[in-house]
Amino acid sequence: MNTTELKSPVSRSIAIDAFRAVTMILMIFVNDLWTLEGVPHWLEHVSADTDGMGLADVVFPAFLFIVGLSVPYAIQSRRKKGDTSWQILWHIVQRTIALLVMGFLFVNSETYSHEALLPRSLWVLLIVVGFFLIWLDYPQPASVAARSLRAAGVILLIVMASLYRSDTASGISALTPQWWGILGKIGWAYFTISCIYLATRGHFSLQLLALVFLIFFSAASHLGWLDPLSSIRRYVWLTGNGAPAALSMAGIVASLVYRKYTAGDKSFYIILCFLAIVLMIFGFATRPVWEISKIRATPSWVSICAAISILGFMLMAFLTDVKRFTKWYDYIKPAGVSTLTCYLLPYIYYSLINLSHAGQLPAFLRTGPVGLVKSLVFALLIVALAGVMGKRHIRLKL
């Protein structure tokens, strides 16, 4: 299959957006489980010393997979607008920096000191406000007002960084990369696979080779072959493990198959089923070597989650493209097109709740099936709020 930066017309894929929306809702849902009591173990993250995974361990890999699904569409769209490869690369770098900055600050909020000048919740709330000011989808991005607001956002983040304090240090120097956070992982994965795709001009065989290499890279890390790179692992995510990039590269491979054959062609299902089976076999065959673990990002976890994501995307493409079952998507569309906004809104909510000292909900609303429904309703309300904000042009755009 020769796919040199696909030349078919660019159109927004409902299957990809719908898959992204469902995944985002699940991410908000599992991220809210900490507010509940007696959560079933199969819904939660599995501990680092356990061989296995729960639903929460599958959601983030699916999102990384979707990042890869979108890359061929995004790059072709920019080609269609007349952008050169260097302009596209600069856009990739800008998006990566944005994600790394957000992830960097969020992960440092986890070690925020109680003795700092500002309460942790207020500090988090203000950095989120800074994110919105900088990366808001302004109707007139070149206007004086938009530039002034972006400048205000930059200043706000600098001030918050200066006020940061951990238990061991204070100020900007106290902020450390640590593990970069969820958004940082997405940023490194996005940068890696986008550069590969751009450099290889979308040749399918080279994307498949890159997927194999990234899984091998992850395996090499767990086997200790990359120990000489330990001094820079904390700064460059790829050299830390390579797992996030492997999951996103699986998305690129699936996207190219999707664009080549469409969901109405049996070749689409045959090729992706074969790929999912190979990944599953590899994952379970090598399980005795490094076990299945999200926390340790083992190759078995990577390959099994990639296979699950491929199968999930195939199902979504079948439902939306073949069966035309799309009406339900209208209700959750903001999660598919304003995804970053949806991801950040819970941070605002939790911060405001903590600052108001509102306290917890009654126990019966946080326990058992009722509690799970509460977290699901919370996720849907976040999506609905993102939809209302989007209509008023209040949404993030990287």
Image: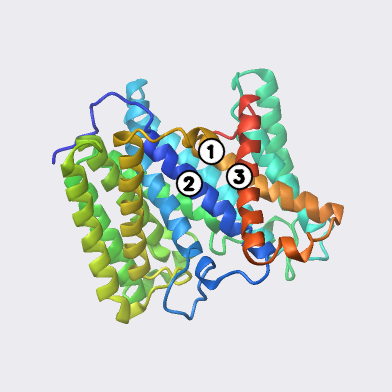
Label 2 vs 3, first from the N-terminus:
2
User: Rounded to the nearest whole Å, what is the CA distance between mark 1 and mark 2?
Assistant: 8 Å
The residue at the point 38 percent across, 50 percent down is 65
The residue at the point 80 percent across, 65 percent down is 114
| Marks 2 and 3 in Cβ contact (< 8 Å) | no
Residue 22, labelled with which disc?
A: 2
| Marks 1 and 2 in Cβ contact (< 8 Å) | yes
Q: In which quarter of the image is the N terminus?
A: top left
| Position of 21 relative to 294 (above/below) | above
The residue at the point 71 percent across, 63 percent down is 366
Binning the other alpha carbons within 10 Å of mark 1 as few (below 14), some (14 to 19) or many (20 upward) gives many
| Position of 205 relative to 220 (above/below) | above
Give how far across and how far down residue 307 sits, in percent: 31, 58
* Residue occupied by mark 1: 332
Q: Which residue is at the front of the view, 365 or 215?
A: 365
Give how far across and how far down residue 323 sits, in percent: 32, 36
Q: Does residue 22 appear left or right of residue 115 in this picture?
A: left
Is any part of residue 225 visible from this angle? Answer: yes
| Marks 3 and 1 in Cβ contact (< 8 Å) | yes
Q: What element carries label 3?
A: helix
Binning the other alpha carbons within 10 Å of mark 2 as few (below 14), some (14 to 19) or many (20 upward) gives some
Quarter of the image where one finds residue 294: bottom left
User: Rounded to the nearest whole Å, what is the CA distance between mark 2 and mark 3?
Assistant: 10 Å
Task: Indicate the amino acid at tag 2.
Answer: Val
Label 1 vs 2, first from the N-terminus:
2
The residue at the point 45 percent across, 64 percent down is 232
Coloring scheme used: rainbow
Task: Indicate the amino acid at tag 1.
Answer: Ile
* Residue occupied by mark 3: 380
User: Rounded to the nearest whole Å, what is the CA distance between mark 3 and mark 1?
Assistant: 8 Å
Binning the other alpha carbons within 10 Å of mark 3 as few (below 14), some (14 to 19) or many (20 upward) gives many
Q: Is mark 2 on a helix, strand or loop?
A: helix
